[in-house]
Image (cartoon, rainbow, N blue to C red):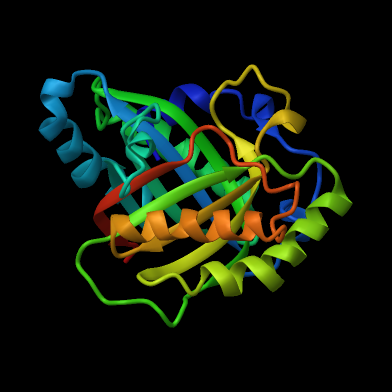
Amino acid sequence: MTLKRALTSLIAIGSLLALPAQAGDSAKTKPGDHWFYAVKTMSTDPAKDVEFNAWYDDIDIPDVLEVDGFMRARRAKLAAADSRPELAQAEGNYIALYDIETSDIDKTIIDLYVAARKMNALGRSTDLLKVTEANYYHRLKSISPSSAIADDDRFVLVQKILCCTKEKERADFVKWFERRFEPEVGAVPGLSRLELYELYRVMEPTAMKPEELPHMLIVYEMNSAASARAVFDKIEELQTSNALPASFAEGDDTALYRQFNEVYSK
């Protein structure tokens, strides 16, 4: 999350880009429902990255975690996977990831907007911030594979899947993910968590229509960059064996990040 940017991008809550009503809508959620906020950022002055990160970690994240519902915040920087250096070429070299638990995600979004206005008025913002993307997602699946290995070196692989614009296609994809993808990819060594999310709301302006946006997001937490390569090898294996559905169409901004900060709400 980025408080100064939230002030400008949320100034008209009614204009936020929301997807058509599906399972992720707040009217259908239950207490304790899980959501995810992913924000890609970069410093407007690379020479001041230290100052930029200090502001983000010491001011912005603590302020966001004061908002009800925000449970965990992580920050990570682009990295290259083994034999996949292009994964470190996405726009915005930093990402902030927030885990949210709320039965009313729209209220939580507005609460964050209110907090952003307050923090901006108090001068708790920076001109070094540039947001390149910010989206809310609803969590559909989450597993912690037994192959997880405790390690201080952590990576996050973020992969967008263009599926799904139709409800049946979406339902079929989720079933396939649960029955085939989770068991196969979950066995990759070093993978500590595998989660499937569905796009709920876009917070940054976009020229694309809602139905044209990648609806699914897969987030892999792992202990090495080599594990990312192993994930792609497994996906290629599924494709070769015709076990990969046509709806599994990867977006063009898949990226690997090395995590360097993790904070939980008090």
Q: Residue furthest front?
A: 240
Q: Nearer the viewer, residue 187 or 223?
A: 187
Q: Is residue 216 above or below residue 48?
A: below
The residue at 37%/76% (across/down) is 148
Q: Is residue 132 above or below residue 222?
A: above
- Name which quarter of the figure residue 70 lies in: bottom left
Q: Position of residue 33 (x, y in %)?
A: 62, 65
Q: Residue furthest right?
A: 168
Asked if one can make out residue 77 in the rendered structure from this viewpoint, the answer is yes
The residue at 81%/58% (across/down) is 171
Q: Position of residue 208 (x, y in %)?
A: 67, 21
Locate the N terminus and report the quarter of the image it occupies. top left
Q: Position of residue 166 (x, y in %)?
A: 85, 44
Q: Nearer the viewer, residue 22 or 237?
A: 237
Residue 193 located left or right of residue 241: left
- Name which quarter of the figure residue 227 lies in: bottom left
Label tally: 0
Asked if one can make out residue 67 in the rendered structure from this viewpoint, the answer is no
The residue at 44%/70% (across/down) is 188
Q: Position of residue 262 (x, y in %)?
A: 28, 58
Residue 55 located left or right of residue 131: left
Q: Is residue 103 above or below residue 10?
A: below
Residue 56 located left or right of residue 163: left
